[in-house]
Image (cartoon, helix red, strand yellow):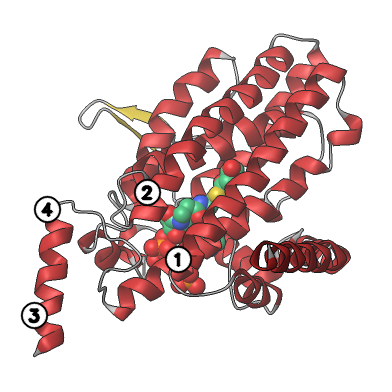
């Protein structure tokens, strides 16, 4: 009875757009959904550093190297921000990382695709970060306070990420024949994995109904996917790039772009670990975590020592 009353009060807060804070009562399923989504979001940010890190030593100029380095550092910060938000739900970061290393937690499947040319740095920034912005701007309205607040800083930095990627695409699309071909090749390989980032269709989404009721999600997977497609097509056409979908057509009745069916077999195949980069991404993450063990131990020892000093002072 008690919980029934609490559940009604909880839903009233959600309906009135009152943010839920860490110490508030919340349904266990609400907590579990947030633990799952925020920690997987954080994993995506950190693993997402790898495809771009691959080009740091091969950036074509000092300027482009500095920009790419700044972007990758931002992603690390986003990951730390999101792990902190997820930890407010009562789970330690080490546990999140263990679940990731054991294959019990996901990260965005888009990061399992290889970055083959410098044009991929443009396509990732323009398309992958562009898709992330659409999703994350919507998440600024999420009902869980720490998650919503983390989104504000992240979204500001994401817009720089998208612009730096688009700038690379502009340079290549207006460059030599080979550069134009590189830009087109990158769009051909990154378009579909980018629109898959929004998750399964609403009718197939395991969590969306409840996540929308609890305003963890403010808009559905398909709504956000459509918004991303509608705004990106115009940008690509401006660069003279062709999207790898012959059925992309502006529907005069809906004023949205129609698109071909998404290859969900490919999506789930990559999510299940059979993508080109899954094993390499996870092994790299595990090795980096092990290599950094001494840094964590030293930082914890130093923190303990300085706490002891403060107490005895
Ligand atoms: N990659 C991998 N798994 C995915 C996925 C994707 N693109 N989309 C959905 N899934 C998984 C879900 O995690 C869920 O599996 P689970 O129950 O084991 O977690 C299953 O597919 C069913 O999907 P649902 O749509 O029902 O799941 P959600 O309600 O969680 O919605 C989501 C999926 C829209 C990705 C949502 O989790 C979300 O908005 N997450 C926060 C944003 C995020 O994680 N973005 C990832 C990219 S971050 C990024 O791009 C960084 C940028 O700087 C480059």
Say which residue label 4 marks: 16
Marks 3,1: beta carbons within 8 A: no
Q: Nearer the viewer, mark 2 or mark 1?
A: 1
Does 27 appear above or below 136? below
Q: Label 4, label 3: how many angstroms apart (C-alpha)?
A: 17 Å
Q: Secondary structure at mark 1?
A: loop
Classify residue 44 by image quadrant: bottom right
Q: Which residue is painted at 56% across and 60% down in the image?
A: 83
* Few, some or many residues within 10 Å of mark 1 (<14, 14–19, 20+): some
Q: Nearer the viewer, mark 4 or mark 1?
A: 1
Residue 246 in the image: state x and y as whole percent.
50, 34
Say which residue label 3 marks: 5
Q: Which residue is painted at 60% across and 78% down in the image?
A: 104
Quadrant location, the N terminus: bottom left
Does label 2 or label 1 sit earlier along the sequence? Answer: 1
Marks 4,1: beta carbons within 8 A: no
* Few, some or many residues within 10 Å of mark 4 (<14, 14–19, 20+): few
Asked whether residue 264 is in view, the answer is no
Say which residue label 1 marks: 88
* Few, some or many residues within 10 Å of mark 3 (<14, 14–19, 20+): few
Q: How many marks?
A: 4
Residue 285 in the image: state x and y as whole percent.
78, 63
Q: Is residue 177 left or right of residue 199?
A: right
Q: Secondary structure at mark 3?
A: helix
Residue 240 in the image: state x and y as whole percent.
59, 15
């Amino acid at each position: 009875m008690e919980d029934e009353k609490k559940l009604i009060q909880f839903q009233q807060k959600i309906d009135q757009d009152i943010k839920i804070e860490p110490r508030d009562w919340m349904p266990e399923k609400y907590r579990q959904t947030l633990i799952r989504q925020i920690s997987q979001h954080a994993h995506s940010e950190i693993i997402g550093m790898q495809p771009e890190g691959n080009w740091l030593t091969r950036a074509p100029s000092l300027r482009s190297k500095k920009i790419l380095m700044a972007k990758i550092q931002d992603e690390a910060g986003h990951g730390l921000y999101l792990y902190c938000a997820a930890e407010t739900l009562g789970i330690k970061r080490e546990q999140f990382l263990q679940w990731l290393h054991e294959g019990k937690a996901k990260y965005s499947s888009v990061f399992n695709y290889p970055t083959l040319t410098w044009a991929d740095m443009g396509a990732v920034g323009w398309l992958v970060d562009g898709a992330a912005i659409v999703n994350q701007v919507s998440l600024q309205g999420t009902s869980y306070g720490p998650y919503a607040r983390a989104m504000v800083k992240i979204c500001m930095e994401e817009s720089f990420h998208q612009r730096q990627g688009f700038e690379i695409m502009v340079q290549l699309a207006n460059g030599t024949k080979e550069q134009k071909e590189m830009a087109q090749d990158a769009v051909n390989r990154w378009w579909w994995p980018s629109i898959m980032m929004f998750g399964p269709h609403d009718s197939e989404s395991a969590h969306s109904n409840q996540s929308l009721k609890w305003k963890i999600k403010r808009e559905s997977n398909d709504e956000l996917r459509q918004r991303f497609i509608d705004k990106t097509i115009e940008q690509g056409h401006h660069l003279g790039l062709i999207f790898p979908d012959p059925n992309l057509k502006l529907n005069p009745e809906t004023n949205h772009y129609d698109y071909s069916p998404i290859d969900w077999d490919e999506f789930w195949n990559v999510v299940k670990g059979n993508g080109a980069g899954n094993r390499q991404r996870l092994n790299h993450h595990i090795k980096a975590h092990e290599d950094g063990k001494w840094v964590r131990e030293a930082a914890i020892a130093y923190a303990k020592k300085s706490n002891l000093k403060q107490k005895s002072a």
